[in-house]
Amino acid sequence: MSQIGNAIEKRDSGPAAVIEQYKTDLALVAASHVKVDTFARLAVGVLRQDKKLAAAAQANPGSLMSALMTAARLGLEPGTEQFYLRPIRRKGQMEVQGIVGYQGIVELIYNAGAASSVVVEVVRANDQFNYVPGLHERPVHTVDWFGDRGDLVGVYAYAVMAGGATSKVVVLSRTHINRAKAKSDGVDSEYSPWRTDEEAMWLKTAARRLGKWVPTSAEKRSAVIERADLALTASPAAGVLEAADPDEDDGPVDAELEPEGGWPEAATPGSAA
């Protein structure tokens, strides 16, 4: 066991205590607009509301801190639709998985300052949808909001840039979504958002693909980028999501930084968040 793990076991070693102890580490990597005290309180509140998540954090506090470090670095709120915290079982052991949600990706796009609005919508079987690249600047999507819209059949995303131009339009069918789903880590888990919130995962897949074509940033910017045509270049825009594979979803995003000596090992049984 690491020295940090030993030190934690000598006092209250529940997940809430671990978060409190490592707030300084969170502050070192957090985006500049993140208030670490508020961030930590949100994380503790999520653990107290979800007994299964708290149990996973108790079993593997290092996985909890890895997820929280990533959320802080991206400037996203943990335990929300910006950044999911999910209990998963890996190799027979419970741990916490951090997953960027579609609202988190949209937030990263807004943070970059180049987009004035971002549209991400699902298409259902009874909707009217028309989009011909080169003919239509944006999809034409008509919805009967009060009728039976039918099953999910597709999803699309685009950004309206600060100068009024439309970014690349991403349109994905069920086939594209199924490819992304197949690559998702823990998709068969009862806790997987593919099971608990399928529509949100369709939206996320489209938003993530859009993130390859418009600027994204973990840091909020006070000034809007004037050259909105940056998003219309032939290659993906540089940003947080640039390295994503075209058919890659959506598995966990793990923090790359950890304190000297590593994160704590499993906490003492019986401690609580």
Image (cartoon, rainbow, N blue to C red):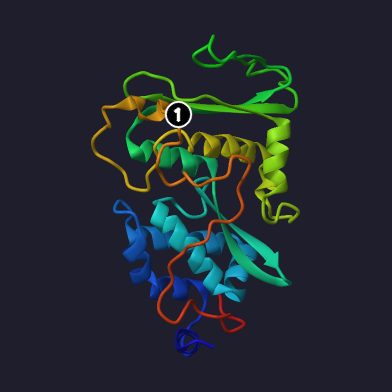
Q: Residues within 10 Å of mark 1 (few under 14, many from 20)?
A: few
Does residue 81 lie above or below 269 as drawn? above
**Residue at left 34%, top 54%?**
31
Question: Circle 1 sits on which residue?
Answer: 234
Whether residue 273 is visible, yes or no, is: no
Residue 226 as seen in the image, left or right of residue 148: left
Whether residue 59 is visible, yes or no, is: yes
Q: Position of residue 123 (x, y in %)?
A: 65, 24
Does residue 211 lie above or below 56 as drawn? above
Q: Nearer the viewer, residue 67 or 134?
A: 134
Q: Position of residue 208 (x, y in %)?
A: 53, 39
Q: Position of residue 229 (x, y in %)?
A: 35, 25
Q: How many marks?
A: 1
Label 1 SS: loop
Q: Position of residue 217 (x, y in %)?
A: 37, 44
Q: Amino acid at mark 1?
A: Ala
Q: Residue furthest top?
A: 135
| Res 223 → quadrant | top left
Residue 25 as seen in the image, left or right of residue 243: left
Does residue 117 lie above or below 106 as drawn? above
Does residue 42 lie above or below 202 as drawn? below
**Residue at left 45%, top 75%?**
17
